[in-house]
């Protein structure tokens, strides 16, 4: 999971779950189970990245996660922790 297919700078114009910006496919394909449980499916990359670091509101679930889903979320957090967003520079 190393290929970024869309250049993300600030992440304000790229939909987190619906655009192929990470690992060569859309996030909802990489983490299908989590995507189904996610309440905010139309958030932007910047909101989700900052949200995961601050335990923000974008990461709200339709129900409590099971242990296996928490493990998936931990996997997702590790993957996203290496993403560096550049403030106020538009995505290309």
Image (cartoon, rainbow, N blue to C red):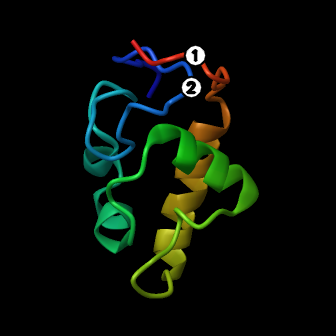
Mark sitting on residue 10: 2
Residue 14, compared with residue 35, is above or below; it is above
Instruction: Name the side, left or right, on which 53 lies relative to 14.
Output: right
SS of the residue under disc 2: loop
Q: Residue at x 33, y 61 (%)?
A: 35
The outermost residue toward the right is 54
Which residue corresponds to mark 1? 89
Residue at point 63%, 26% (across, down): 85
- Nearest the viewer among 14 and 88 is 88
Q: Secondary structure at mark 1?
A: loop
Query: In the figure, 31 relative to 19: above or below?
Result: below
Task: Give the image location of residue 40, x and y in percent.
Answer: 39, 65
Figure check: 52 above or below 70: above
Q: CA distance from mark 2 to mark 1?
A: 5 Å
The spot of residue 41 in percent (x, y) is 33, 59
Callout 2: 10 Å neighbours few (<14), some, many (20+)?
many
CB under 8 Å between callouts 2 and 1?
Answer: yes
């Amino acid at each position: 999971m190393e290929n970024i297919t869309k250049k993300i700078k600030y992440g304000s114009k790229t939909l987190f779950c619906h655009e192929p910006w990470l690992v060569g496919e859309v996030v909802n394909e990489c983490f299908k189970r989590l995507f189904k449980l996610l309440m905010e499916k139309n958030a932007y990359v910047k909101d989700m990245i900052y949200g995961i670091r601050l335990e923000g509101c974008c990461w709200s679930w339709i129900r409590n996660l099971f242990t296996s889903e928490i493990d998936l979320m931990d996997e997702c957090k590790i993957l996203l922790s290496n993403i560096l967003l550049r403030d106020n520079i538009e995505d290309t």
